[in-house]
Image (spheres, rainbow, N blue to C red):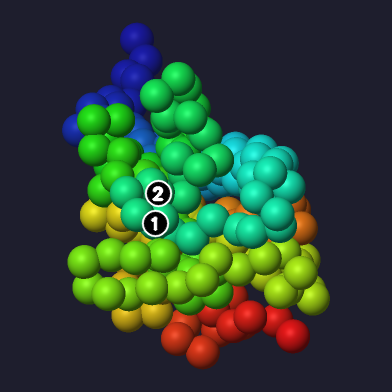
Amino acid sequence: MKNHPRVNSSHRSGFTLIELMIVVAIMAVLGALAFGVASRVKTKAKLSTSVQRVRDLGPMLMAYSQDNQGRLPVWRDGEVYWWQELVDTEEYDPADFFKSPGHREFDPDRVEATISYGWNVRVLGRGTSDDDGDTATPKRMVNFRRPASTLVLADGARKDGYGMIEPGGPLPDPERYGGEVAGLMLDGSARVFDAVDDFKVDSEVFQQPL
């Protein structure tokens, strides 16, 4: 009767465990990569939606200007904010127009403070009057020779942005879309901007193009 060599069961189990650990590690790495890719794709999709949303505001801005002898809205005209000049918020839901899809802090009950987009007050004006005596004459379309280079509004601050962007004040949230934001130009086109580099104090977006 032949004697068959014994198999070291402990050695076999240990080898199988190592293999299992390697497989699990590989799966974890692949899972993390897949999650990262999926997250970036989702962020890009939301940014694209925001770009389309600001582009949709373009015709409303043009209509306002045509109805007001070429004037453009300021951030606040008395008690009326720029978004109320573009859309009748008593009749329409502001979230349908002014909520950026990646802006989780938007609150429909606090639109004034949490509206997703910020008006470029440095270029288009803060207000005709307010409690601080800050006044500005509404500008007209003819004041801008390069409307395609003039930023009207963009994705704004994460919270308490009050519908404006300006140096030293509320600025675009760089975390909303992975460092990028959507912006509406005065000619009605939409662009994607770098949330940090394009919104520094001396950046072109805060200058009136000549």
Percent of width and height locating residue 94:
42, 31
Q: Are marks 1 and 2 in contact (CB under 8 Å)?
A: yes
* Position of the N terminus by quadrant: top left
Name the element at disc 2: strand
- For label 1, the crowd category at 10 Å Cα-Cα, with few meaning under 14, some 14 to 19 and many 20 or more, is many
Task: Check the image and name the residue furthest to the bottom.
Answer: 202
**Numbered label tally:** 2
Percent of width and height locating residue 11:
25, 37
Residue 140, quarter of picture: bottom right
Q: Residue at x 20, y 33 (%)?
A: 10
Residue 166's disc number: none
Left or right, residue 14 beside residue 55: left
Task: Find the distance from the CA under tag 1 to the CA under tag 2.
Answer: 4 Å
Residue 81's disc number: 2
- Identify which residue, 173 or 71, lies in the foreground: 71
Percent of width and height locating residue 142:
76, 69
126 above or below 161? below
- Residue at mark 1: 76
Percent of width and height locating residue 59:
71, 41
87 above or below 140? above
- Identify which residue, 2 or 190, lies in the foreground: 190
Please, what is the three-letter code of the amino acid marked with disc 1? Arg
Left or right, residue 110 beside residue 118: left
Please, what is the three-letter code of the amino acid marked with disc 2? Tyr
